[in-house]
Image (cartoon, rainbow, N blue to C red):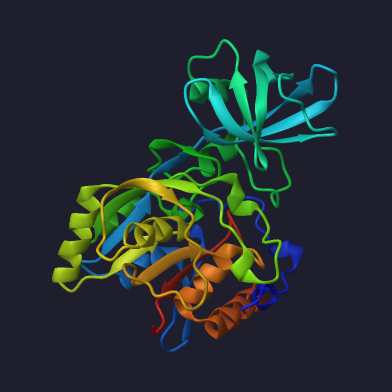
Amino acid sequence: MKLSDFDYELPPALIAQHPAVERAASRLLHLDGRSGELADRQFRDLPNLLKAGDVLVMNDTRVIKARLTGRKETGGQVEVLVERVLDHDRALVQVRASKTPRAGSRLLLSHGAIAQVLGRAGEFFELRFLDCTDVLALLERAGSAPLPPYITHAADTDDDERYQTVYARTPGAVAAPTAGLHFDDAMLATLKANGVTIAWVTLHVGAGTFQPVRVENLDEHTMHAEWYALPQATVDAIAHARAAGGRVVAVGTTSLRALESAAAAGALQPGSAETRLFIVPGYRFRVVDRLLTNFHLPRSTLLMLVSAFAGVDNIRRAYAHAVAQRYRFFSYGDAMMIERGDQ
């Protein structure tokens, strides 16, 4: 398939700029990938769509304050977006500046942070933060929430809370696993009381998730690498659910990619690794039965993933329905529950 096969028209007014007043107050479009049937629901209906014995796999990554502003020593303004923390004083970053910073130059950033440019690493730069013993602590002090480019306001204290899941605990992501933003503590308690198992993965979402696909031939696209960890307890929970007739429900494309990456060799394997898994129509899913996800950008790898999961025609029809019914799109928008299509 071609990149142009994954395009659709979206009125800008449907791009959510702020979250719903309450986390669980969003809408939920239910798509059966086998029949193609659509149903308009509320996110609070989710407990009625799950049954005792199902396992809900959630990404517990925590978004770091990855955006820094400042200037070069020569005076030009600069914006830094951390892609990945490498160790206690180094990070891989994107740099926006009028001129490319040279190796050895220094960036004078907010709150007195100073970084030295060590060199290029492909499309990224490697920085060393001077007089720094903990990059994460420095970012918490000097950075701001890395809202995606289609959200037009500067991050504020509300975003610090709402661009983060209530169960976030492992810092490292520079974009939120947005399907999880709909859950509040009351919803999690209800699901557990109903016999739904909550299990965890960690996948640190990179800024590359917003990078456009630049080739028409999808075979030529290279995915950005993201680090994930799958604990033995989650592998065991999935095996137990399978044995009891339960379903594996991935909360977000990040959870799905971690699970499918960990099963790439066959059986689901615990551990940690880098993944560049690129899921397009024709991919055969090994682990996930149902996917809870937000609506994704046109021509994006995530739109390709959900098209592989539910069927291209089903997703085209579902997105056209969502636009017509004025669902809210992208990170702060509404959600979909997708039943996997026939493979």
Residue at the far bottom in the pictured view = 35
Return the residue nearer the eye: 194 or 77.
77
Q: Residue at x 49, y 58 (%)?
A: 25
Quadrant holding the N terminus = bottom right
Taking the image as shown, residue 238 lies to the left or right of residue 35, namely left
Taking the image as shown, residue 328 lies to the left or right of residue 133, namely right
Answer whether residue 217 is visible to the viewer in this image: yes
Indicate whether 127 appears above or below 226: above
Answer whether residue 185 is visible to the viewer in this image: no
Return the residue nearer the eye: 38 or 261.
261
Q: Residue at x 41, y 63 (%)?
A: 44
Residue at the far top in the pictured view = 131
Residue 116 screen position, x and y as percent: 67, 19
Q: How many marks?
A: 0
Quadrant holding the C terminus = bottom left
Q: Residue at x 51, y 53 (%)?
A: 178
Residue 12 screen position, x and y as percent: 75, 63
Q: Residue at x 14, y 70 (%)?
A: 243
Residue 5 screen position, x and y as percent: 66, 78
Indicate whether 183 appears above or below 214: above
Residue 256 screen position, x and y as percent: 40, 61
Indicate whether 132 appears above or below 48: above
Return the residue nearer the eye: 136 or 4.
4
Quadrant of the rendered image containing residue 160: top right
